[in-house]
Amino acid sequence: MNKFIVIICCLFSLFSFSQVAFTSWTNSYLQVTSYNGNSSSEALTAKLAGNGNFTIPNWKLSAKINQTLVSDDGKYTLPANKISFQPSSTTGQQSPTATPSFTEIGAPLNVILQENAEAFLIPNSNSPIYNNSSQTSSYYFLQMKFNFTVIGGAYLGAFPAWTKFTVPIEFTTYNQSNGIIGKSTQTYQIQIGNITDAPPVADEMSMQINLSASKGVLEFKSIQDYSNGASVTYTDGLSVKSNTNFQIKVRSLNSNLQSATGNTIPIDVVNLTLSGGSNSNQTITPIVLSSSSQALVKTNTSILTTYKYDIKYYTTGQDQRLISAKSDDYATTLQYEITPQ
């Protein structure tokens, strides 16, 4: 009987992949003077570059806020989910074809950030990092520009005029096996100006993966784990605050659990369910993990309520795919999403 560990979320380390390097830079200042929020055009540039010939399919680009966003004077907190990125344009050089557009890459039109959880600006590129030239030292680069937005809302009225926030955001690119191509951190300066327009009547909705659950580990270390199934539960692993109906969906960014040595296990050996939240006005549905988005929770609410869910990952007993798997550490990345219902 083999012993191995399934790692639900990516493990992170810093290194370069093959001949390709990742860099980024930013236009860092944004002032907000309206309850409508504000955007900075092409405020992030992310660049992949290298020399030689290579093909890296299914690569990813993520953004992560690793800390609570406290104002420079220490008095106020800016919710991480009030910050978002939108793809703007791509330029570059590759051989023998042109570098891809955001449409060809498959970039989401709007990505809202979360505290202590990765949000993927490129979840799984449809176009590889690719260069194939007769010149062995041929130069390649793909430069991607994103708009930076502070989302509008009545919450802005809680900040006095000229409140400043310093926002460090960590950007990471991954290859098809979740190996890190490169990582960089850019710092944005947000100033809440003198807001004089009328505040909107708006829905409030936020979600946070708590730090203890941001890297889940499901371990197989005994015969019973194979016979009866293994499980791990993260108490209060998911927190939601909303004053409107919402649903929570989740999907794996890969169709397989993958190891650094190239071994794979189908993602659907792992099940996921939530518990808690509220005793009424909600439907919780256990799911089998998939690369397709699936609804975990559907809730009806009309007053501002905080929900705390336990996250449980588990397998069923006597699954031959697990029994015959090679001893190794396997990983995938899950993307949680909250939307109005």
Image (cartoon, rainbow, N blue to C red):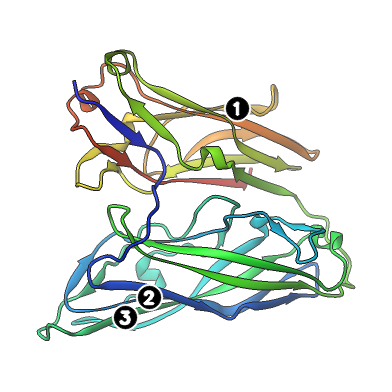
User: Residue, x 20% and y 82% (percent of image)?
Assistant: 95
Question: What is the C-alpha distance between the residues marked 2 and 3?
Answer: 13 Å
**Residue 108 at what x, y percent from top left?**
48, 62
Residue 222's quadrant in the figure?
top left
Q: Amino acid at mark 1?
A: Thr
Residue receiving disc 1: 283
Residue receiving disc 3: 141
Neighbourhood count class around disc 2 (C-alpha, 10 Å): few under 14, some 14–19, many 20 upward: some
Neighbourhood count class around disc 3 (C-alpha, 10 Å): few under 14, some 14–19, many 20 upward: many
Residue 73's quadrant in the figure?
bottom right
In the picture, measured across the screen, residue 336 lies left or right of residue 245, that is left
Q: Amino acid at mark 3?
A: Phe
* Sequence-first tag of 2 and 3: 2
Residue 41's quadrant in the figure?
bottom right
User: Residue, x 76% and y 37% (percent of image)?
Assistant: 305
**Residue 279 at what x, y percent from top left?**
69, 21
